[in-house]
Image (cartoon, rainbow, N blue to C red):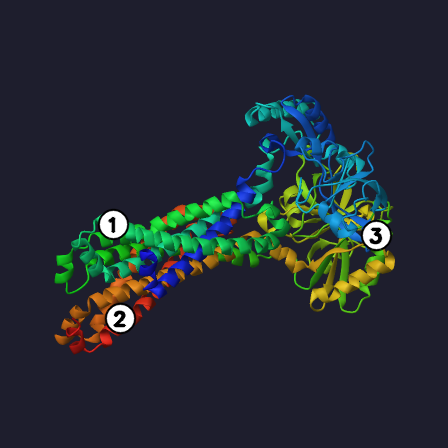
Amino acid sequence: MRVLQSLWTAPRFFAAAVLTLGLGIGANVACFSIIHAVLLKPLEYRDPDRLVIISGGATPTHFAEIKWGAHNFSSVGTYAMEEDLALSGRGAPELLKTVRVSGNFLEILGISPLLGRGFAESDNTALISSNLWARRFSSDLHLVGQTIDLAGRAYTVSGVLPPDFGFPLAGLDVWLTRPEDSPQFSPQSRALSPFLTVFGRLRPSVTLEQATAEIKVLQAAYAKDHAAMLDAKPKTPPTAVPVQETVVESVRLELWLLFGAVWLVLLIACANLASLSLARAAGRSAEFAIRSALGASRMRVVRHLLAESLLLSILGGLAGALLAYLSLSAIRQFAGVNLPRASEIQFDGAVLTFAVGLCLVTAILFGLAPSFSASRVDLMTVLRMSQGSARPVRLRSALVIGQIAISIVLLIGTSLLIESILHLRSQDLGFESHGLLTARIALSPNANARAFFEGLLSKLSSSPGVQHASVSLTLPMTSYPGTPVQDASQPRLLLNQRPLCAIFMVSPDYFQTLRIPLRRGRAFTEHDREDTPRVAIIDEGLARHFWPDYPAGRNPIGQRLLIGGVNKEPAEVVGIVADVHQSLDNLGWNRSVYLPFAQTAPPSAMVALRVENYPMNFAADIRRAVQSLNPAQPVSDIRPMQELVDAQVGPRRILMQVLAFFAFVALALAVIGIYGLISYSTAQRIREFGIRRALGAPQTSIWHLVLSQTFRLALCGVAIGVAIAIMLTRFVSSYLFQVSPTDPPTFVAVCLLFLGIAIGAGLGPAISAANVDPAKMLRYE
């Protein structure tokens, strides 16, 4: 009760401490809840530590050899790439995210369906997600055994999977069988391409090293027997990787960086509170001295102040825990499918334990220094003092220097990311992303894709405001397939010895729609059809690869290329276009080949419109045109092309925004700390300043004294911060583009900016000290 009464006598300090700790602890608890759910908590499968994925892809033949030859695995399965299939009937048509998995995948994972059972023996059964079951079928308990229409084919629903089930990918709607027959590839491509991912369950007592060694032996035997296969000579040897690592690998570094940032902010908050507590303890020095004189031991004074710190931490922890609990639903909704296991984020026992431990840590962090400083107060010293002791000032100076150092680290990290994003945005992508609208359309495998897309382009091209319309298998800044390519005039190489190139099937107006410059030759025309000779357009990167003296030497126009499978007819190069960056993550790699859409006509394609104004104004035009051709055909992912480009910098941008927020908070707390310390120090030296002014010192000399103290304090913190930043910025190097982790201009700019802000924080106390009347200064005591 005495502790609470003591705090209640300083309501502003009490409120500031609880609010600061509440925000700092709340941010840490919320961040830990994400770390725990995503990175630390085991997957909700049977013995999840026994589940592994074999790195690299596999052909159906390779998978069969692994299945029968991997004795360290109790069971092995596989899955193919995600595909979009149209669901028709029972409402408006909808494009569903679908994956084909081996029939034993539930047994491998140790999961039972929420409703129904696993796959039946027939290959026309489907498992659906609980989300789709509730959203589309109103949680119909009698759905099992009924049929649904996917891409024009009837599938029998055999079961509904548990809520939040997301293997092998989050956000899936439907699971089908027979991944080796994936319709995304032709029969010849399926036989040669490593499009399957192999996963399995290790036998008891088998280690990852033993499993990897066995897989490497099987790989060597496979490469010897199937030298022509694309997966015979992988770039990196296959390894057994825990499933949990593959699930969270894409976000692991970002989450730990985020956790480190919130810890740094909490350290600054604790340093700020310790500084305030030192100032408050200095004001109570007479009280503590009298207590000591009346018989109170030093440990009793320490216990009293530590009890105050603990009470503040508990109250701040309660506020922070409540804040974290209330924020979790917003975090889950914001993260969506972009954060693996986001649905598992919750305030559980582990998070509560962390919150309690954090309260104790913060109590110690900001309570120890004031407690021991106050315990050393002597009554006679206090009675003889005409001004405050220098010890609290030294301690507060050390705390403020620590705040400055942490602020510098966060500011430098944020600045490096901002500079990287600016560099990325300034890159010439090779096409014009503004004024483009894109959409995805997935037809059924038995549909006449050529006739449908030709009719669609005819309707869209005649729409008012549409300058050009095109269709392609995929677009830049999206995933793209690779295919082996070889100069047909050279001795034939095995498929796995040929360079892999990005392949695009495009309509004649594709290059005009995306405004990709044509360097040589011609674009595709309506005459490049299935019954005409194969033709191809390549980019300058591929031209330089096969003909190194391009553009001055041999003309690639008229040359022939072997593209894809071993038995395909060579394609004649009829045009060369400018290099297009297919991904911002790999800007240095340009090697693309374009084929006429009419000569291949895949059932799934992307539509692109070049329009006169805001692209989304034309979304209805795409829907109307599609519905006029097939009312049961869904359209998905209608978005401006610029969104696809922006998504490429998404992870960097999110990390930059989070670090920028914490850097701003850290900067504000550091400036407050500088201002408070300089104000306190100036007040203690007021008699000295009075004497100086009385002896004729000008105001500018007082300004110089105060501001030089401010500058020395800031410079010391900046120097320490730079040293720490040099050691830590390497952790964000994978997010940097054309910027060194120790980029000198960035470091110098941040340091100069902070020193300027610090001088600004010291101006107020300097002006106040210089403007007070000397006579009043001398009468201060």
Percent coordinates x, y for residue 37 in the rendering: 55, 44
The residue wearing badge 2 is: 766
Tell me the distance, in whole angstroms, between the alpha carbons under discs 2 and 1.
39 Å
Q: Indicate which disc, 1 or 3, sits on the residue closer to the N terminus.
A: 3
Residue 608 vertical placement versus 345 (above, below): below
Q: Quadrant of the C terminus?
A: bottom left
Amino acid type shown at disc 1: Arg
Looking at the image, residue 280 sits to the left or right of residue 478; the answer is: left
Q: Nearer the viewer, residue 142 or 715?
A: 142
Residue 218 vertical placement versus 413 (above, below): above
Amino acid type shown at disc 2: Ala
The mark closer to the camera, 2 or 3, is 3
Residue at 45% from the left image edge and 54% from the top image edge: 318
Specify the quadrant of the image occupied by residue 146.
top right
Q: Which mark is residue 300?
A: 1
The residue wearing badge 3 is: 90
The mark closer to the camera, 2 or 1, is 1
Q: Nearer the viewer, residue 695 or 427?
A: 695
Q: Indicate which disc, 2 or 3, sits on the residue closer to the N terminus.
A: 3
Specify the quadrant of the image occupied by residue 761.
bottom left
> Does residue 413 appear in this view?
no
Specify the quadrant of the image occupied by residue 192.
top right
Amino acid type shown at disc 3: Arg
> Does residue 687 appear in this view?
yes
Q: Are marks 1 and 3 in contact (CB under 8 Å)?
A: no
Secondary structure found at label 3: loop
